Amino acid sequence: MKFSWHRPKNRLGPREGDSPIFVERKLGQSPVRRSWLFLLAVGLLAVLYLARGTLLPAAAAWLDVGRPPQSADAIMLLTGDAETRAFAAAALYKAGWAPRIVLSTVANRPPPQDPLDEQSKLPREHEINLRVLLACGVPRSKVVILDGQARSTYDEAVALAAYLAESSPQRLLVVTNGYHTRRARWIFQRVLGGQATRIAAISAPMDDLQADNWWRSEEGFAIILGEYLKLGFYGLRYGNLGYGAAVLVLLLVVLVYRRNWLMGKDLGQVV
């Protein structure tokens, strides 16, 4: 019987009889390395926390990639927040920036479990948007409602892709809230590819969400935190691990600061 003193090149882990030093190197479990990584993570969090006065307002501002209005062939009104987006789209139309407004059809609600549930009797969001547009003076003939059953921004991007293939408008204005513009742009770029260059995001103003103090209100905190959670999911889901990890670190800093701010508020302190 012949024995070989050479280790196989395709070994994936240690085997019985390996020396402790070889096992430690193979598994990458160096105590010094773990300590340095831990200190690096703590140091990074500390720096981000100390810079919160600049970081937190910048975090909200970074989400907004909206641009000034420009002449276009149509205005795409994204579903959500009918109290602001529909009014902004109507104002753009009446100012002459585009000759028509495009809506996506929102999916039907599931049948209610309770026959007396009043929520099931409410109109769908695109129907609410249409009523707002008509009330603001937009003619019904200037509103295009796309086919489909949209449940997300991704579904709306898919519906818009079909519309672009049929009507071939050269430029569109996509109206949504400022905090939603970065993720919406990302989704449209993935769905439309090169055609996404024909789209300009327009930020609908919001009176109850301010970039310099959004973390001090329950609504502002929920909106910005939720948007970063969705961005982190998209980053991890579509392979941009560095992007997703950076978003999650920022979320951790925001959660720590929010907790401390609430504690200071309860104690009557200004944090």
Image: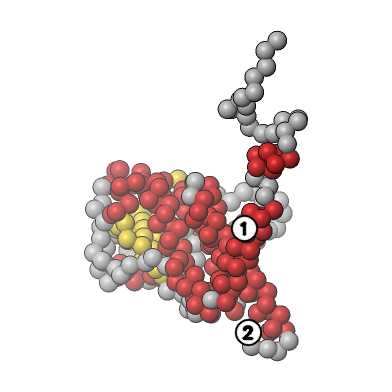
Q: Secondary structure at mark 1?
A: helix
Q: Is residue 268 above or below residue 47?
A: below
For the residue marked with disc 1, what is the amino acid? Answer: Leu
Residue 64: % across, % down: 42, 67
The residue mark sitting in front, 1 or 2, is 1
Q: In which quadrant of the rendered image does the C terminus lie?
A: bottom right
The numbered mark at residue 37 is 1
Q: In which quadrant of the rendered image does the N terminus lie?
A: top right
The numbered mark at residue 271 is 2
For the residue marked with disc 2, what is the amino acid? Answer: Val
Residue 250: % across, % down: 56, 65
Q: Is residue 227 visible?
A: yes
Question: Reading the chain from its start, which is encountered first: label 1 or label 2?
Answer: 1
Which residue is pictured at 24% across the width and 53% down the height? 170
How is the model colour-coded? secondary structure
At label 2, counting other C-alpha atoms closer than 10 Å, the crowd grade (few under 14, some 14-19, many 20 or more) is few
Q: Nearer the viewer, residue 131 or 7?
A: 7
Which residue is pictured at 63% across the width and 63% down the height? 39
